[in-house]
Amino acid sequence: MDKLFGKIAVTIKANFIIVSMFLPALVFAQKINQKEIKREKTLAKSVTIIRDNWGVPHIYGKTDAAVVFGLMYTQCEDNFKGIERNYLYQLGKQAQVDGEINLYTDVQLQLIADSAGAIKDYKTSAPWFRKLLDAFADGINYYLYKHPEVKPKVFKHFEPWYALMFTDGSVAATETGGIKLSETKDFYSTAPEKLGAVTSQPAKNIYDMVNERETGSNGFAIAPSKSASGHALLYINPHVPFYFRSEVELVSDEGLNAYGAVTWGQFFIYQGFNQHCGWMHTSAYADVADLYAEKVSKKDGKWYYEYDGKLRPVITRKLSFKIKHSDEIEQRSITGYYTHHGPVLGARDGKWLALKANNRSYNALVESWLITKANNLAEYKKAMNMVSNATNSTVYADDKGNTIFWYGNYIPKRNPKYDWSLPVDGSTSATEWQGIHKLSEIITITNPATGWIQNCNSTPYTASGTSSPDKSKYPVYMAPDGENYRAVTAIRVLKDAEKLTLDGLVAKGYDHYLAAFDDLLPSLFKAYDAAPDSVKQSLAEPIKILQQWDKSTAIHSVASSLAIEWGSLMMKALPPPQTDQESTFITRRFQTLVKTISPAQQLAWLNDVLKNLQSRFGTWKVEWGEMNRYQRPDDGITFDDNKPSIPVGLTGSGFGQLPSFQSRTMNTNKRYGYSGNSFIAVVEFGTRLRAKSIVNGGSSFDPASKNFTDQEQGIIDGKFKDVLFYKKDVLKHVQRTYHPGDGFK
C-alpha cells in the first residue's frame, strides 16, 4: 500500500511557539466582538442560577435558550477542562495537547465525523433549535470572556456547530463497528511495526492489567403494584468514570423543567426526570454499526472498489492534525479514504473495512433535547420516534404508573441471512441497509405483569422475568447480546420485592453479592481438594476463608480481597472475544473459563495473590477496605497512600455487583476508585415528585470548596441526599444566587 501520510507541512519551532502564544488572545479578542458581548449580556440578565447547599446549580430562565446559556456557563464554572477535553476528543484534536499517543484516536474521529457536515447542519437547522446551538456557544464564550485567567489549551472560542459534533451523551458515544484502534493505526501509519492498541499508561504488571475497563449501567423501573406508595419508581445508576457528568436542574418559562445528569459540554439531560416522567439510559449492544469489506484495486494511481460488478472510485479527503512534541508543534496531513458505505478504518484479509454508522447526528441531538422537555409518555414517544439515538436503551417510568423498556432506538433494517456481527461483503447491494426500524418494531416491554424491569447492559430477553420478550420474534441483530452477572443479581433482588420505598430500592441497587463467584469458586475448591498435601498445606487457611465467605463484599472482609484479586487473574485469562457481541456473554464465558483453566493454574494464581498481598502489605490477610479506597486528589490524578482516603466495601461490576466501584493501583500499594457509580438517583412519581440523588465526591471541582467531598461517604454507603426539585424547596437551601458573569449576590 502507498504511504498514506502526507509530508509534514509545517514544523513550528520553539522560537515561533513563543510568538504564537500571543495569537490565541488576539484571535479570541477578534471573535468576542462587541455585538456578541452585548447579546451574551442580554441573555445573562434573563438567567438566574441558584446553587443549593450541595452546590447543585438550579438554572431558571425565560426561554429554553437562556437556560442552555446558563447551563453552559455553570458547566464552565465547575469543569471547563472537562468540556474542552470532550471536544478535543470529538473534533479529533487530542494530539495537539497530548502528542503522538492520541494521534490515531484523532484519525478515527476525524474520519468518522466530518466538521463540514456539522457546519452544514447548523446552517440548515430549524430556527428554534439554532437558538439553542447559539446559546450553547454563547454560554461558554461568555464564561471565557468573563474569566481571562482561564487558559484553554486549544479552543479559545467555541462555535455553535461544535455541539453537532457531540450528539450522543454516552460514555461510549462513538460506534466503530468493532474495528480496533490498532487496525486504524496500521492502515494509516507508515510505521513498520504493529504496536497494537495505544494506551496512555502501559501496565507494569499483571495486577495493573486486569479489571481496567468499567462496563455497565443499571436501570430499574418498578410498577405501582410493587411500590409501598402505589406510585411508579425509577432507579438511575450509570457506571462511568468518576465526575463524568454534572447534576443540574433546568427550568424555563417555555415548559422546560427537568433534573438530572448532563455530560460535560452538552446541553441536554442525559439521564434524569421531571415531575411527570423519568428516563435511564443504559448502553445497548443492538447492532447499529457495520463494517463493509471492500474489494479494492489501484488503476492509474487511483484507488477503486468493486460494487455490483462495477468499479467505483474511492473518495479521498485530506485530514489535518497538529501534534505536540516537547519543543515544537508539528502539522501533519493524512489522506482519508471513503466508500459510499463510509470511512475506511482499517483492513483485514486484504480488504478495506468501511464503517456505516450514525455517529454524528443532527436528529440525535434534537431527539435528546425533546426527551429533556418531554412531560408525558406521548411527548416522550414522539421524541423517541425520531429513532436517531444509536447507543442506548431506555428504562422509563411516569406518574401515570407506566413502566417501559425500549431496547435501543436507532436500529437499521438488514437482510437477516447475513452475520452482521462480522464485516459483510461490501461488493454487493444485497448487504445494504433497508431503512431504519420504527420505534414500534424494536424490542419493547410495556407495563409488565411482573411489575419490574431491569437492564444492566444485558440481554433484553430476561429484562422482566416471565414478562420478558420472546426472542424468536426479533432478528438476531436487534439484540445479539448475552447475560451478565449484574443482571443475574438484579433479577434475584427484584423478582420477589414488594412494597418498595425509595430507600428500599436504593438498598436493592446496593446489593453487594458477587454472583460470578457462584461459578468461579467451586472449581477452585475442587482443584484444592484434588491437590497434593504439599500444596494444600500452604493454601489451607485462605481456602477455608473463601469457603466460609458469603460472596458479598465488605470493608472488613479478607475473603473479599482474596476473591477479587484471584478472580481478576482468572478474568484476565478469558479468551479475547471475536466480536463486541461475544464479549457480552459474560456468564457463558466464565462458565467456559473454569473448564479450560487447569486446576494447577487456578491454585497457582491464588498463591500469586498471597505473595503479592504479602509484599504490598506485609500480610496476605488484608481486609478489603484496607486496600480498596476512595480518594479525590486535588489535581484529579495523583493518588497517594500517605494522604487521607476512605475505605470502600464495593468493587467493580464485572463480578456481578450492582453498585460499581472500579479500582486499581495507581503507582500505589492500595487500590483507588476511578470509575463506576457516578450520578445516581431514585425517583417516585406521585402527585408530588419525590427523589433522592448522590454523586461521587461532590459537585465542585475546587478542593477548597465544601462541595468537593461532601457526598463521598454517601455514595459509598448508599445514603442519598434529598433532591430539591421544587423552587420553594431550593430557596430554603440557597448557597448563592447570581446571574452569569455578574458575580454573587
Image (spheres, rainbow, N blue to C red):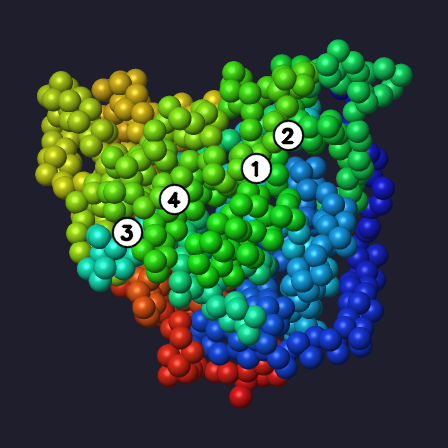
Task: Report helix, strand or loop for mark 4.
Answer: strand
**Side of 671 where 555 appears, left or right:** left
The structure residue drawn at horizontal position 75% and vertical position 29%, both measured from the top left corner, is: 337
Q: Which mark is residue 175?
A: 1
Amino acid, disc 1: Glu
Tell me whether the residue at label 2 lies in contact with that at label 1, contact meaning CB atoms closer than 8 angstroms. Answer: yes
Frontmost of labels 4 and 1 is 4
Tell me which label, 4 or 2, sits earlier in the chain: 2
Q: How far apart are marks 2 and 1 (CA)?
A: 9 Å
Amino acid type, mark 3:
Ile
**Residue at 64% from the left image edge and 30% from the top image edge:** 355
Q: What element carries label 2?
A: strand
Q: Where is residue 338 in the image (x, y as percent from the top left)?
A: 74, 29
| Residue placed under numbered mark 2 in the picture | 355
Q: Which of 142 and 595 is in front in this view?
A: 142
User: Mark 3 or mark 1, which has the lower sequence index?
Assistant: 1
Left or right, residue 485 beside residue 264: left
Instruction: Assign a secondary structure to mark 1.
Output: loop
Q: Position of residue 505 (x, y in %)?
A: 25, 55
Q: Is residue 88 visible?
A: no
Q: Find out whether the residues at labels 4 and 3 contact each other: C-beta distance under 8 Å.
A: no
Does any portion of residue 147 appear in the rendered image?
A: yes
At x 54% / y 72%, what residue is drawn? 252
Q: Label 4, on which residue?
A: 405
Look at discs 3 and 1 and give the one toward the viewer.
3
User: Which residue was labeled with disc 3?
Assistant: 222
Q: Which of 197 and 262 is in front in this view?
A: 262
Q: Is mark 3 on a helix, strand or loop?
A: strand
Q: Which of marks 2 and 3 is nearer the N terminus?
A: 3
Q: Which of marks 2 and 1 is nearer the N terminus?
A: 1
